[in-house]
Image (cartoon, helix red, strand yellow):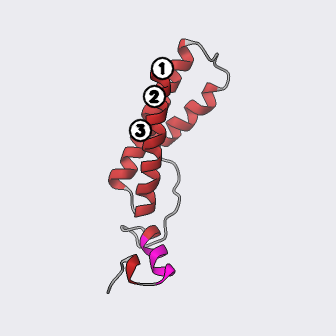
Amino acid sequence: MDTSPAGGTPARAFDWMFRNRATGEITIAQFPNAPLWIYLATVVARWPLPADGTARLVNSWIGVTALAWWALDEVIRGVNPWRRLLGLGGVSFVISGVVTLLR
């Protein structure tokens, strides 16, 4: 059976993009894993920190490192093409964050 998106309907393309290769279910979003929770915690913790302080800089580096961990994990082990694309988006966000931190 041809399951490639080029072979047919939008429904088949959707299935190819979002079907979890391990479980067979549609997977668009998942409950955050440890690196994503760490990143989200740094986002919340950043709010009260002074913009020019060392604590803010350390917090930012922890956040960008956690996001890189999550993004690379998605690119390498994502359960479907959509999750891998999300990982690539995360990698571009990480690159932007690193460039900003290195200025």
Q: Provide the residue designation for mark 3.
A: 68
Main secondary structure along the magenta-highlighted residues: helix
Q: Are marks 2 and 1 in contact (CB under 8 Å)?
A: yes
Q: Earlier in the sequence, mark 1 or mark 3?
A: 3
Q: Nearer the viewer, residue 6 or 68?
A: 6
Q: Are marks 2 and 3 in contact (CB under 8 Å)?
A: no
Q: Is residue 21 above or below residue 47?
A: below
Q: Is residue 36 above or below residue 10?
A: above
Residue 6, x across and y down, in percent: 39, 78
Q: Residue at x 42, y 67 (%)?
A: 20
Residue 69, x across and y down, in percent: 39, 39
Q: Nearer the viewer, residue 24 or 53?
A: 53
Q: Which residues are magenta?
A: 9-16
Quadrant in which the N terminus is drawn: bottom left
Q: Residue at x 34, y 54 (%)?
A: 77
Q: Provide the residue designation for mark 2.
A: 99
Residue 50, x across and y down, in percent: 64, 16
- Distance CA(mark 1)–CA(mark 3): 19 Å
Q: Residue furthest bottom?
A: 1
Q: Is residue 47 left or right of residue 78?
A: right
Q: Earlier in the sequence, mark 2 or mark 3?
A: 3
Q: Residue at x 40, y 62 (%)?
A: 81
- Distance CA(mark 2)–CA(mark 3): 13 Å
Q: Amino acid at mark 2?
A: Val
Residue 33, x across and y down, in percent: 47, 46
